[in-house]
Amino acid sequence: MLPRGWRLGFRNKLLVASLLCLLLPASITLYISNSYTEHILRSQVIQNERRSLEQESLYISNLFSNMVLVANYIQFDPGITLVLKENWQRSKLHQPDTARHILDFKEVTDKLVSVTSMMEKTFVTVLTSDGQYYSNYSYAKLNVGALLQQPWMEAARKQPAFELYWAGVIDNYIPTAAAGSPQVLTIARNLKLSSSSTYATVMISIAESRISQIFNDSGKGQQTLLIAPDGTVTAARDKSLLGQPFSLMAAVKPAADSSFIDYRGEQYLLSSLEIPYGNYRIVSLSPYREAVSRISATHRWSSAVQVVSGAFFLLILVLLVRQFTKPVIRLDQVAARVDRGELGLRSGVRGYDEIGRLGKSFDHMLDRVERMVLQIKEEQAQKRKAELAMLQSQINPHFLFNILNSIRLRIMMRGDEENAELLSSLSRLLRMTIQQRDEYTTLHDELHIVRSYVELLNFRQSEEVALDTDCTSESLSVRIPRFLLQPVIENAYIHGLRQAGGHILIRTWTQDHRLFIEIEDNGQGMDEDTLSRLRAGLSSKPPGKEAMPPGRLAHIGMSNVYERLYLTYGSAFQITTDSRPGEGTTFRFVLPGQIPDQAKEKERGRDV
């Protein structure tokens, strides 16, 4: 219908179509991208600042946590408190004992050095009521009189016995360390008798430079500050700001949040995050223009790469379209017919170029279909084995680490026969976790693991969790996946009992060649909405091994249990749950009485 001069050949038609299909969407995409660039950049800047603050907050929290732990250790160590009390009594009765004081000084000093040896450089000073002191640093004559007259020391000595006083950043009171650390962040705690008489004051300090050195103030005009509860600057790279009120404290929101403010004629991003100790807060002030420039440069380079890549692809497409079109259509038709089951069909496409070799390879691929099917089955079996091994190996190393540290601290503080049994329980749990290599175990052995786990839980908390079992003799010999019950018990302890005391009951029985397992706790239970979401997650089936989501339930432990059961039994198992607010939660597992044949063959193959 067009005039002859307007008619386009196939190549020109393809070129026009390529321009429309590539350049038009690309132009629209770039326009939309530029329209939303400001919003995206703002979000990215906020996220970057938030991640930086979280990392710095974690480091500072660890420093503060170590200081609090040292204060608690000194207050509750019977050896140290006994020495300090006897010293107070001798001073009160005017009965000095020089030899005894030397022995006591060495004993207390050694303990202070030992407890702080694995921490960041921490200065610990125990100042007695008669002017003597013990420390973990090299001996130096302190000006005790001047130290006691400091306003912060007077406020600290008025605090109750079990409360910490956060003195903030003060001038370093230690003569030998003042040159390297002019200012220190200090906390104090009084040690008092039942009569409310103070017999000693504990002072724990860290150098202010240990905090400010982690602040990432790499940009021009960027500042990261540690703010005290009264709004003064506690730590900063700029030492002139220490002890000064933070000028933008009114703009800092109580909750962890970020906002853009006008400051010094420029737009700044103000972000803050509260430290979980002493009501301190870490605040970041960053120029928005400089922060955006680093991210927008990446965005510009990305856009340029996309444009160049699109133009190059268009050129290659135009040059090779004639050679590709007919053979590709032929291969597409053959592939469609093969997909319908005509495996004996061949394309017949031959040539010396890539398409010719593709056609030849395609025909050879059809010849090897049967052999490849067997190979794919073997690969899928190996993948399933790897998935089971990976899921089975998921155990929380922090739990074991905390338990070992707790036992170590208790042994260090005092001898206790109770530790022998705790170490025995932990040894059994480690042996079952590390030395055992079978994927399956009997219910009897699994219950032993759970009981050892609960004994270790009871060690970590003041209120014990009571574990009872009601199991038939037939059910104890049934083989189940190893570490099946431990994640459920952990879930009940953390979310049901809220890491407090309570009762957990495990019932097991067999019926109609199936194993029934019920785990019941008397915790806080769940409301109807939470229970409905949990049941929906438990009742839905994974779409397949390739597309199976990594975590279907709310917590990694329960997700691990669900996926391991699915990989072991397929759809031949059931998980149900019942819960009432304030009454507890019950999980029920209904499993086949025997491990499927495929899983047995895998286990035998591994043993061989």
Image (cartoon, rainbow, N blue to C red):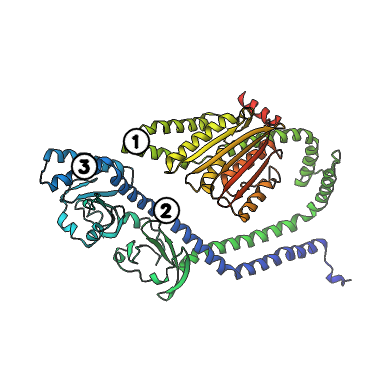
Q: Residue at x 68, y 30 (%)?
A: 594
Res 413 quadrant in image: top left
Q: Secondary structure at mark 1?
A: helix
Q: Residue at x 78, y 36 (%)?
A: 369
Query: Real-space Cα distance between discs 3 and 2?
Result: 36 Å
Query: Real-space Cα distance between discs 1 and 2?
Result: 28 Å
Amino acid tagged 3: Val
Q: Secondary structure at mark 3?
A: helix
For marks 1 and 3 on the same chain, the one whose residue lies earlier in the sequence: 3
Residue 183 x %, y %? 26, 58
Tell me whether the residue at label 1 lies in contact with that at label 2, contact meaning CB atoms closer than 8 angstroms.
no
The residue under label 3 is: 83
Considering every residue shown, the one lying at the far right of the view is 1
Amino acid tagged 1: Ile
Q: Could you classify mark 2 by the number of other residues whose Cα lies within 10 Å: few (under 14), some (14-19), or many (20 or more)?
A: few
The residue under label 1 is: 411
Left or right: 306 with respect to 348? left
Left or right: 566 with respect to 117? right
Left or right: 352 with respect to 256? right
Of the two numbered discs 1 and 2 in the rendering, the one whose residue sits closer to the viewer: 1
Residue 476 x %, y %? 61, 29
Q: Who is closer to the viewer here, 230 or 199?
A: 199
Where 48 sits versus 338, above or below?
below
